[in-house]
Image (cartoon, coloured by chain):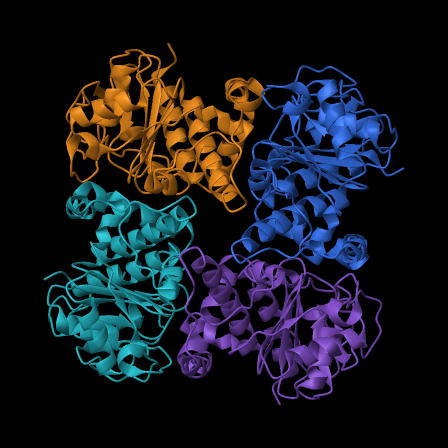
Chain colours: A purple, B blue, C orange, D cyan
Amino acid sequence: MPDLSDVIEELCLANRILSHEGVIDAFGHVSVRHPGDPNRYLLSRSRSPLLVEPDDILEFKLDSDPVKRIGVRLYAERVIHGCIYQARSDVMAVCHHHAPAVMPFCISGKPIVPVFHVGAAIGEQTPFWDQADEFGDTNLLVVKPEEGQSLARALGRHSVVLMRRHGATVIGASLKELVSRSIFLCQNAEYQMRAYLLGAPTPLRPGEIKLAGAINLMPTAAERTWEYWTARLKASGGWPPPAKAAGEPEVKPAAVSGEKKKRP
Amino acid sequence: MPDLSDVIEELCLANRILSHEGVIDAFGHVSVRHPGDPNRYLLSRSRSPLLVEPDDILEFKLDSDPVKRIGVRLYAERVIHGCIYQARSDVMAVCHHHAPAVMPFCISGKPIVPVFHVGAAIGEQTPFWDQADEFGDTNLLVVKPEEGQSLARALGRHSVVLMRRHGATVIGASLKELVSRSIFLCQNAEYQMRAYLLGAPTPLRPGEIKLAGAINLMPTAAERTWEYWTARLKASGGWPPPAKAAGEPEVKPAAVSGEKKKRP
Amino acid sequence: MPDLSDVIEELCLANRILSHEGVIDAFGHVSVRHPGDPNRYLLSRSRSPLLVEPDDILEFKLDSDPVKRIGVRLYAERVIHGCIYQARSDVMAVCHHHAPAVMPFCISGKPIVPVFHVGAAIGEQTPFWDQADEFGDTNLLVVKPEEGQSLARALGRHSVVLMRRHGATVIGASLKELVSRSIFLCQNAEYQMRAYLLGAPTPLRPGEIKLAGAINLMPTAAERTWEYWTARLKASGGWPPPAKAAGEPEVKPAAVSGEKKKRP
Amino acid sequence: MPDLSDVIEELCLANRILSHEGVIDAFGHVSVRHPGDPNRYLLSRSRSPLLVEPDDILEFKLDSDPVKRIGVRLYAERVIHGCIYQARSDVMAVCHHHAPAVMPFCISGKPIVPVFHVGAAIGEQTPFWDQADEFGDTNLLVVKPEEGQSLARALGRHSVVLMRRHGATVIGASLKELVSRSIFLCQNAEYQMRAYLLGAPTPLRPGEIKLAGAINLMPTAAERTWEYWTARLKASGGWPPPAKAAGEPEVKPAAVSGEKKKRP
């Protein structure tokens, strides 16, 4: 089992990379399944992902109740995470966002399809989920367990689900795969949209999607992207998170169970 | 009643956030109703909102005459603010701008409609006002009381009014609501415009607009956006405003009535 | 007559503002008529405008020969400036550029027309000049006197001339007017282009163009934009230009005639 | 023969400029032919070009095997470089990338043609290569010698080859020519794409392409662009690369043959 504090740090880094690369803005959230307990997941308290620090990370049960109640605000839509972890034992990380590149598709109802080799990371299909089909008029937030379950059913065995008039939810077999797929989804959507200015975009051939979908998993690709996105985040001043002043009281001393390494 | 100097500081922060987030450029302005006197409002002297400091804030009567004349240039279009505060007692803050995302709509005459849940903050309708309808050929600036009154009538009970060949004016029940709505209007307009590349955009259903319009007011949303936009502004070096050097003479010692806390 | 060194400093600032605001990139150039001699103009040696410093500024005769030959590279296209100063005694400043916002118009041959009040600064018409009409196949650079004269004729009494497959040239009655008009041209072009996504853009009415064209000259507008663009340039580290190290030899001790104040 | 360490430094600078100017992102790579041995080329180990440092540069034979095996990851697609150097003795530098501006063309299959004078640097034609034509379903990476050779054949005597659903490969007679052409290709593609919003873009006339294609080689242009792009990279903190700490062990003491000057 990986060290819990390392996973928490990687989760913070994933939050900030996805913000800095323009996938997430004030809203959106990123979670990871607990490395020591598949029936738990880790997610920040309600805070913009660009600002998430290790002390913001809380532990949740798969019904999306926090393991410990400590009086901080929680993301209203955390059932998205819990319901997907319940439905898909292979999923280790989840991101929900309203990226500018995907919104025109969510609004027009046109599917995003892989149009270049790196975009194959999104898989053959990106199913659409329209909350109104099952729940009628809502505020479009996914807050009830049955809404989260419905979304998880729409996701099915795929890696991305588009949400009508709302955004997208992306899953990964690891945090790094999730970050790559989320960024590549946006690149693919942006290029696909711009290609409509020139004529009908040509998607990858089905065989190409299968083969190119694995590029993301090649060590040369995975190491290169993570180093690159981290370096860009650091250059912007966004990493590491601000150090806690000595003697500062612990806001939430036991919000995540398991051994936490002290930060020096 | 909130402390006046806190309101002034929040107004400066609102000016700078709206500039930094790309709603406002060299032009545009942001005001707030005086917290202690509903017949007064606070607005900067003529200066780009990115640069507004507490000492720039002046107090105006609802006829848009400054309470004290102190020999600084004033925004030519301040009647926009005064006339809306007169017509709408529920309005506590006003922003006028020419955001790049809304201009294509102001030019083509196509209405902006809410196309995603966050965009519901703009309300069901964004009426259009064409200055030429009532006033014929003008320089398109809203400078006469009757022009401001005409604009306020076009705004009616709505939250946004689009101005043909000019820009937009947005109102809020508070400065924070105003800032959120102004930014969400731009996001909505940008996504709606891009959706035309893919086909006819699907707007929210009427029931969804009503329900999703309140997301903006949820504490989890309001706290998250304000912290996020402030953090981004700070990271850019745009906040806090430059400290005044010790011994620097007061430019306008009594431009705003009421008790002002000294800045340390 | 304004102090020559102040004019040179303002010219450097204009070069850098136009680069920083995205009008000019590696190419493009900005000149001003000599404040003490209408038969001379000031222009940098061949260098990207973002980097231009006072010591780069040279003095040219209206035939675009340098007053003193000092062995530095010159802009190949300086006849654009000389020929316009010859043809138009009212012109005090000239900018030639390939701004991304205007290029789609230069390529498609569609005219840029004022579509919002600030855009009225470009005037009613932006004539097109196609070098091939008179000169057949060239490398499209304007380097011969007859090419510059042809361009000046196409400009006529207007403020902007578009150059097919090349870029644009803008004039001003002062450096500040030039800078504003160049930036507003780009904003207008960008909004006009995006408006085509929504339907036919509605240009300003002829009477509006006349009236709104003067906004640029209002002191509230001119002071606000100049302070804003300068502040943005400074925040980027682009102003002031790097100080010359003590004892550093003068590269071109007498390239501009007239009294130059020493920089402290 | 130019000093090897100077060539390596210029190669690092070219890598970083192309990243900073938005041609290359996490992926993409840039090589130069060995200045002392036309049967060798220099290319970084597998790393995002924005981060490439002199110690990352390795020497390869034209079959794309490294001259010395030192246990670092290599770019999977380095045969692109080797096969082009084999096929084209006039080529001194190669760049492969997936620039956002070219992707809509690679996806729609519409050719990029020179639409403004600076864009003439790409030449009259940008041939298309579709890996599937010869190799059927692949992951679209160019990793086998026969794939690289097929791409080199498609490039032919041209300067740019577009790769269906993948990206582009650009060549130069020098590193500086390569950098300019790669950036100008992106500008040309972006303007061409936007021109479709306004109507059919007018490409340069054949005679103009020939004449304007040489602008890139004018000393005034070449010096100006290199100084400009380098200054922008420096201002971003991206140059020079981080200095190696004293006493830090050499990672790969002899990865490039020939005399290397010590960095001070």
**Quadrant location of residue B7?**
top right
For residue C74, side relative to residue A137 (left or right) = left
Relative to D166, say whether B82 is above or below. above
Q: Nearer the viewer, residue C63 or A194?
A: A194
Q: Nearer the viewer, residue B212 or A4?
A: B212
Indicate the position of residue A24 as horizontal and vertical percent values.
61, 62
For residue C208, side relative to residue D193 (left or right) = right
Indicate the position of residue B236 as horizontal and vertical percent values.
57, 47
For residue D193, side relative to residue D206 (left or right) = right
Relative to C138, say whether D189 is above or below. below
Quarter of the image with the N terminus of chain C in it: top left
Relative to A55, say whether C241 is above or below. above
Residue positioned 85% across, 67% down in the render: A71
Residue positioned 59% across, 53% down in the render: B191
Residue D195 at least partly seen: yes
Q: Nearer the viewer, residue B190 or C247?
A: B190
Farthest residue to the right: give it.
Answer: B1
Indicate the position of residue B23 as horizontal and vertical percent values.
61, 42
Quarter of the image with the C terminus of chain C in it: top left
Residue D255 at least partly seen: no
Indicate the position of residue B98 as horizontal and vertical percent values.
60, 36
**Quadrant location of residue A151?**
bottom right
Relative to D184, say whether B258 is above or below. above
